[in-house]
């Protein structure tokens, strides 16, 4: 054959500019060189221009006193804290709204998605209308609406709506409710909870192995919950059950004591959850519809209960369709939380913006904000990819 | 998100602009463009506000108009760019505007680390507190535990924290970028207190109280907790342009001091007073020194008016704000406004 003859023929001497191997190398070296040169040009030119315009540069400002107050913090913070801590407060606030948003919108979205498949006409239509209403209006408008509703509709702190024997107060300053007084035992209860969760996981694995070996089922889920919750409870009882509470009380302008969920946080969380759950509902619906009807029939024929067939047969297969687009929704929640700036929730963008404004160092701060969002988003992606791989169809 | 975009724009501008900034570079660009890009606030009555015809008016706007009159001989050759407190500095750094006339307080950090030059003081202000009358407060010292509405990225935000720290009081800030949203939060009762420069408090109280509430339902507490000299800002790198902005404002003050107004400026051209002749360019030299037409002051006064006229029309007794001249009176009348001589 002609092709075989060509392949086995002695190598003809070609000019180097006609040799595909050499040519490939040359092109790649040129491209890498150009990219490196461009990067070098940009960096050196930036530094040069910053110096010429006498704009400060470098990350020294992170250790300086921030001087501004933040309205909603999860860790100790005061205007005497550093810029680095102010930014850290912002990161934690972003994470808080993102994590809660992801959990709540997954639950709500799944319920809605299943509801849209319900044979009940009313439920079906309500879910369909919900999805269309929420995903077709920009999120920013929803945020403005919820924020306005909270600040306009609820009374001031002195006329607050109180419930549960005056222990919970709802006003336009937020929802105040009592919390246990800080006690050293809380730390140990946290440790006990972690130990309990680890114990539950071990128990579940053991139960699975035993069932594979002997066929005997073990109620590992309910007993696992018992271990995870019982252990901290035991620690609490062992410490003499300290039950002092911090109650919210109207003092001067506002409530003091207890803890508060602020209107800005509520508006942002509600907006994010309602908006994103509309998308998640469609993803869940598509995942379930992707399954062949024969799957549930086969599960029933094997004698599995409805719950078992959902858990062991249907969901694992539907998840393979659901998980990849779900990752994008989780990333969207995280990134959309930056709309907080419009309604005054002190998230990462807000902290960074004030820092840019007070220090004038836009480039450094933008690098920080990009690094923060990138690491959060990449962590979510990495976790979801791991989970996706775990539930993927393993062919034997 | 807009300021993030703008900050990226700064990055890109700084990264790609290869030419060194030389004296006159900004001025040449402005002349070539044919108008002045002036950064103003997003809406504070009396200082910068688009009126019912969509025309920008106010004390800050008059500074932009004066500079345009000096450079082009036409006060209308200005393009206004409304900026929030957070956007303004990046907009100026990135060259999106030539001049910022936006109630910006002169501070050391802004003058140095941000790469700016302040070119005078248009309004001597101080930070105050506004509260609903029904709270029955008499003093800012009674504000312990209050929720305070404040704009981010301002000296106001820092002074507020300093004041409460110094007086061992606590507060909760509600920080929203758009001034309309801050006011809405305050008027709806989300905050107990609204704090900003006292002039802007007066403007808000006069122009923004939503019905059925009235101006009488709000009081401004007597304490002034800071010095806020507000003035126009340019970026480093073009001293000639900075000089023009600086002396345009001085010209308005000098004109008031020597009694030159938009009404009598044509008669004043015939004046025998050597100082007035020098100011109005009848005796040439001043315009040339700045690189401008000799009639630069004439154009400013004819089209914009002197400082006193502008003050009265926008924020003073001739306006709904009715702010007294106070510290902003000329030095000859016991105020702080003092322009170096044009000679």
Image: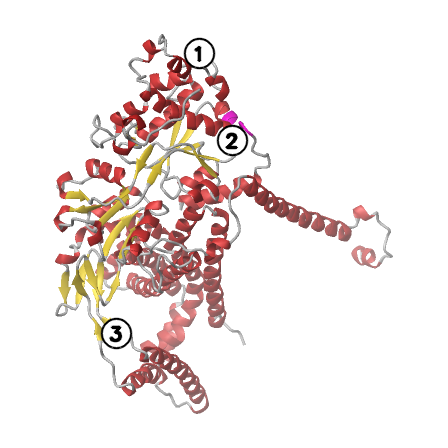
Q: Chain of mark 2?
A: B
Does A389 sit above or below residue B149?
Answer: below
Reading the image, the residue beneath label 3 is A181
Q: Main secondary structure of the magenta part?
A: helix
Of labels 2 and 1, earlier in sequence is: 2
Figure coloring: secondary structure
How far, Cα to Cα, is label 2 from label 3? 61 Å
Q: Are marks 2 and 1 in contact (CB under 8 Å)?
A: no
Quick one: label 1, few (<14), some, or many (20+) residues within 10 Å? few
Of residue B207 and residue B160, the one placed in the foreground of this image is B160
Residue range corresponding to the magenta coloring? B23-29
Reading the image, the residue beneath label 1 is B283
Q: Chain of mark 3?
A: A
Q: Residue at x 37, y 12 (%)?
A: B273
| Residue A235 image-quadrant placement | bottom left
Where in the figure is residue B265, as x and y percent of width and height?
A: 33, 13
- As for residue B193 lying within the magenta part, the answer is no
Q: Secondary structure at mark 3?
A: loop
């Amino acid at each position: 054959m002609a092709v075989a003859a060509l392949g086995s023929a002695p190598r003809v001497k070609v000019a180097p500019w006609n040799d595909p191997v050499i040519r490939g190398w040359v092109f790649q070296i040129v491209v890498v060189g150009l990219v490196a040169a461009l990067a070098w040009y940009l960096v050196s030119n930036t530094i040069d221009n910053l110096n010429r315009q006498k704009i400060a540069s470098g990350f020294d400002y992170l250790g300086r006193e921030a001087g501004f107050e933040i309205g909603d913090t999860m860790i100790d913070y005061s205007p005497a804290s550093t810029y680095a801590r102010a930014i850290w407060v912002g990161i934690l606030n972003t994470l808080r709204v993102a994590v809660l948003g992801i959990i709540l919108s997954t639950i709500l979205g799944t319920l809605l998605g299943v509801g849209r498949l319900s044979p009940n006409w009313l439920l079906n239509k309500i879910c369909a209308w919900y999805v269309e209403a929420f995903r077709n209006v920009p999120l920013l408008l929803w945020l403005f609406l919820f924020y306005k509703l909270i600040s306009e509709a609820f009374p001031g702190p002195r006329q607050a709506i109180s419930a549960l024997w005056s222990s919970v107060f709802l006003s336009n300053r937020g929802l105040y409710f009592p919390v246990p007084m800080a006690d050293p035992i809380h730390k140990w209860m946290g440790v006990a909870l972690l130990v309990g969760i680890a114990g539950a996981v071990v128990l579940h694995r053991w139960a699975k192995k035993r069932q594979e070996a002997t066929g005997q089922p073990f109620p590992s889920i309910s007993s696992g919950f018992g271990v995870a919750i019982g252990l901290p409870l035991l620690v609490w009882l062992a410490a003499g059950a300290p039950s002092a509470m911090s109650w919210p009380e109207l003092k001067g302008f506002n409530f003091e004591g207890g803890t508060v969920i602020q209107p800005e946080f509520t508006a942002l969380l509600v907006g994010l959850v309602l908006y994103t759950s509309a998308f998640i509902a469609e993803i869940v619906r598509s995942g379930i519809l992707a399954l062949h009807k024969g799957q549930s029939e086969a599960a029933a024929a094997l004698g599995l209960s409805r719950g078992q067939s959902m858990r062991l047969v249907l969901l694992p297969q539907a998840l393979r369709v659901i998980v990849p687009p779900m990752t994008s929704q989780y990333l969207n929640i995280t990134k959309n939380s930056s709309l907080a700036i419009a309604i005054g929730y002190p998230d990462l963008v807000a902290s960074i913006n004030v820092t840019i404004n007070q220090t004038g160092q836009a480039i450094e701060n933008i690098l920080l904000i990009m690094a923060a969002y990138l690491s959060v988003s990449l962590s979510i992606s990495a976790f979801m990819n791991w989970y996706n791989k775990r539930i993927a169809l393993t062919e034997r | 998100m807009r300021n993030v975009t703008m900050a990226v724009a700064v990055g890109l501008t700084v990264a790609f602009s290869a030419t060194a900034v030389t004296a006159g570079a900004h001025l040449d660009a402005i002349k070539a463009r044919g108008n002045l890009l002036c950064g103003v606030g997003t809406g504070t009555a009396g200082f910068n506000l688009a009126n019912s015809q969509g025309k920008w008016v106010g004390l800050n706007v008059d500074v932009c108009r004066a500079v345009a009159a000096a450079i082009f001989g036409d006060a209308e050759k200005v393009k206004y760019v409304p900026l929030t407190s957070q956007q303004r500095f990046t907009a100026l750094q990135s060259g999106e505007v030539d001049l910022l006339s936006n109630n910006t307080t002169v501070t050391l950090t802004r003058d140095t680390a941000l790469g700016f030059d302040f070119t005078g003081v248009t309004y001597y202000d101080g930070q105050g507190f506004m509260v609903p009358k029904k709270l029955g407060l008499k003093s800012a010292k009674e504000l312990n535990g209050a929720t305070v509405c404040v704009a981010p990225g301002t000296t106001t935000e820092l002074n507020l924290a300093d004041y409460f720290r110094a007086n061992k009081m606590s507060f909760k800030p509600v920080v929203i970028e758009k001034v309309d949203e801050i006011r809405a939060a305050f008027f709806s009762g989300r905050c107990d207190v609204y704090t900003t420069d006292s002039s802007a408090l007066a403007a808000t109280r006069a122009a923004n109280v939503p019905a059925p509430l009235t101006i009488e339902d709000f009081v401004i507490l007597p304490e002034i907790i800071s010095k806020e000299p507000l003035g126009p800002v340019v970026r480093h790198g073009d001293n000639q342009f900075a000089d023009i902005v600086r002396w345009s404002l001085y010209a308005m003050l000098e004109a008031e001091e020597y009694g030159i107004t938009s009404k009598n400026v044509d008669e004043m051209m015939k004046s025998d007073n050597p100082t007035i002749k020098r100011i109005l360019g009848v005796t040439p030299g001043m315009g040339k020194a700045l690189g401008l037409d000799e009639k630069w002051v004439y154009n400013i006064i004819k089209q914009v008016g002197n400082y006193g006229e502008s003050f009265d029309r926008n924020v003073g007794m001739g306006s709904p704000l009715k702010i007294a001249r106070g510290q902003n009176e000329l030095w000859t009348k016991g105020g702080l406004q003092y322009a170096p001589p044009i000679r």
